[in-house]
Image (cartoon, rainbow, N blue to C red):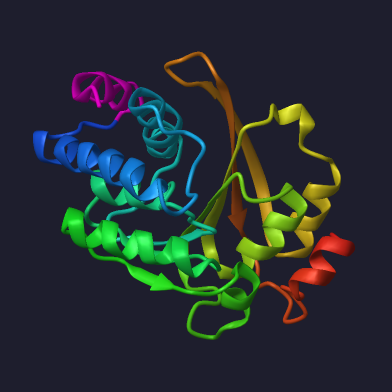
Amino acid sequence: MNKEYLRQSAARCGVKLTDEMLGQFAAYASFLREYNEKVNLTAITDPEEISVKHFEDSLVLLKYIDVPVGAAVADVGTGAGFPGVPLLIARGDLRLTLIEATGKKLVFVERLLEKLGLRATLVHMRGEEAGRDPQFRESFDLVTARAVAELNRLAEYCLPLAKIGGRFVAMKAQPAENVRASAFSAIRKLGGSGTTVYEYPLSNGDTRTLLSIKKISQTSPQYPRNSGVIAKKPL
């Protein structure tokens, strides 16, 4: 991995990476490629593409979202650790919880954190299960999800986890105009408001969309529903 390229990419996101952080990112990329040979974690295996499409695309959240020092952050459907682990590398003050339903992926993240010398809470649950669990419900300053589902379904997985005054940030590949209007009705039902949409280019020219949603009221106890109902009858 080209460390200087990542340093410059991060700087464009307003993130200053130290040599130690760059070493952690290099170790992350190497371990991801190695582990991906036995467990399917990502289709992106070229080191420079990992740098841009995984690392830069995770760190860009810090350009647009003011994340308080010591914030409690939940990454729903973290997969191979994105965007949560890159955020933790850049912001070691964060109290990170990584939520993932696939055990094999969570094992990878656990071993990755050990390799990088980082600490986070790992939760082997589906997002909607965590949202119903009193330990996690409405307890996070920031809830993130990256390319997990359509926004109206994703909001039901994630907004119940955000505390009042907190935020849910959805990171999507599609342009903002492709986000269905029905999603904004779902967001209101779940206690969210004030959706702000950012579109931005990555270093390779690919366009990404970030949607920042403020949690303004408690989520009704009827949400989140089980995953089957959410899939068949999205809000």
Region in magenta: 1-14
Asked whether the viewer can see residue 235, the reply is no
Q: Does residue 133 sit above or below 179 in this rendering?
A: below
The extreme left residue here reads 19
Residue positioned 74% across, 47% down in the render = 150
Between 8 and 64, the one nearer to me in the picture: 8
Q: Magenta span: helix, strand or loop, mainly?
A: helix
Name of the residue lying farthest toward the front:
38
Above-or-below relation of 27 to 101: above
Tell me: residue 87, above or below residue 121. above
Of the pair 162 and 25, the residue shown nearer to us: 25
Instruction: From the viewer's perspective, tell me whether residue 39 is left or right of residue 6.
Output: right
Residue ID at (26%, 19%): 5
Q: On the image, which quarter does residue 159 sit in?
A: bottom right
Please give the name of the residue rendered at 72% of the width and 73% of the height, measured from the top-left corner: 224
Q: Position of residue 149 (x, y in %)?
A: 69, 50
Q: Name the spot of residue 211 as percent of width and height, x first.
A: 61, 40
220, 155: nearer the viewer: 155
Q: Position of residue 60 (x, y in %)?
A: 42, 33
Quarter of the image where the N terminus is located? top left
Whether residue 75 is visible: yes
Can residue 96 be found in the magenta stretch?
no
x 45%, y 54%: residue = 39
